[in-house]
Amino acid sequence: MNIREHIATAGLRTSLEGNFGLPVVLIDPEGAIINTNEDGDTLKGQVLYDRIGEDPETGDEIVVHENQVTIRKTALSRIPLAGEIWKIAFPLDPSAPDTLTTHLLTGTRAPIDGGSIGFIKIFPGEVSQI
Amino acid sequence: MSGIDNQMVYEQLRDSILVLLGAYAANRFRVVGFQKKTSDVAEHEGLVRSVQIFFSEEDADIFDIKERESEVVFQIEYTAAEPNQADVATLDDLNSTPAQYASALAGVQEGEDLANKSFDELRRMIIQILLDPANKDFGLDEYTVSSPRMRNFRKNGVLNRGSVFEVTGSERFSAKVTETFAGVTPTAAVQPAISVASEFVEESGDIEDNPSKISIDVDTI
């Protein structure tokens, strides 16, 4: 196993799914549920709730409350593609990891497919009941 | 009364427009009659989408005549916001079948699409109200307001505001109005008290002490 493969598997497994990881459930456009990794363990990913952005009016740094979920690609049986609509559920409160809230992956913001290293970063959108 | 104490036509028109829009707003949209600096996106979500309308332009000349026609312009700012919508109940149900999940995902209504349509609908309502010939006088005296028109419509790009997608835009409503300019000169001059002397000195130097013979010319204002 070369370094790239190692990072894509063991390295990201530690950084994204280790003590910092939170459970994630995906449902693909065909309705198939993905809630386990390739080993059958609970699918986990890195969930971030904020990022540093820039106020467009002042140019000042501001905290933007935007959810991001990063998952190791080798853990997934199917990789979300840009333009597809998926359900993605994850905890909104890291101290309550068993309570997952439904979000959507839509065409609004395509996932960042980290082909070089082996992760995929998803930007879930909130959803309301029709 | 001085002109600075009375509303000019553009102020009366402003108030009339707000009343007119408010009468049709019902549960369709919210009317804001001033320019808001900041607002929470939640204030514009769903049927609480908002229209801000405020007086913004007029070219006024020197008030050398009592009535003058001028064009007044009101800036209109539209804001609409919508979230993604889906059959969340089915997506959350652990007992749903894959076909049900797939159907729910296929039925997702993306927030950008909903926000765009909501915005277009809001704009449609506003121009229908303001350009309706039945409203041409805007509650003011006949012929005070003429040539209402909407121009310079612009729609901005959709923004992702956390849980919702927001679409904003602007337009200008203009009309010709007949302004009455009173200026600041009081309409009735304050006359100084006239002191009637009890004595009147004649050219001869004699003093006439009969007040009934004293006459003073007073100019009529």
Image (cartoon, coloured by chain):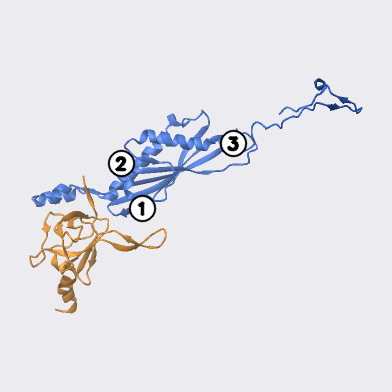
Mark 2–mark 1 distance (CA, rounded to whole Å) = 20 Å
Pointer 2 or 1: first along the chain: 2
- Chain B shade: blue
Determine if residue A85 is in view: no
Crowd tier of the residue under label 3, counting other residues whose Cα lies within 10 Å: few below 14, some 14–19, many 20 or above: some
Q: Which chain hosts label 3?
A: B
Label at residue B47? 2
State the SS at label 3. helix
Q: Residue at x 38, y 45 (%)?
A: B78
- Chain A shade: orange
Q: Relative to residue B126, is residue A10 drawn left or right?
A: left
Question: Amino acid type of disc 1?
Answer: Gly
Give percent across and percent down for residue B111: 27, 50
Give percent across and percent down for residue B103: 15, 48
Give percent across and percent down for residue B59: 56, 43
In the image, farthest residue toward the top: B212
Q: Nearer the viewer, residue B46 or B196?
A: B196
Select label 1 or label 3 by which is in front: 3
Mark 3–mark 2 distance (CA, rounded to whole Å) = 41 Å
Q: Which chain hosts label 2?
A: B
Mark 1–mark 3 distance (CA, rounded to whole Å) = 44 Å
Rendered position, A108 above or below B208: below
Select label 2 or label 1 by which is in front: 2
Give percent across and percent down for residue B77: 41, 45
Residue annotated with mark 1: B157
Q: Nearer the viewer, residue A8 or A89?
A: A89
Rendered position, A81 above or below B39: below
Q: Relative to residue B28, is residue A82 drawn left or right?
A: left
Residue annotated with mark 3: B3
Q: Nearer the viewer, residue B82 or B182?
A: B182
Question: Amino acid type of disc 3?
Answer: Gly
State the SS at label 1. loop
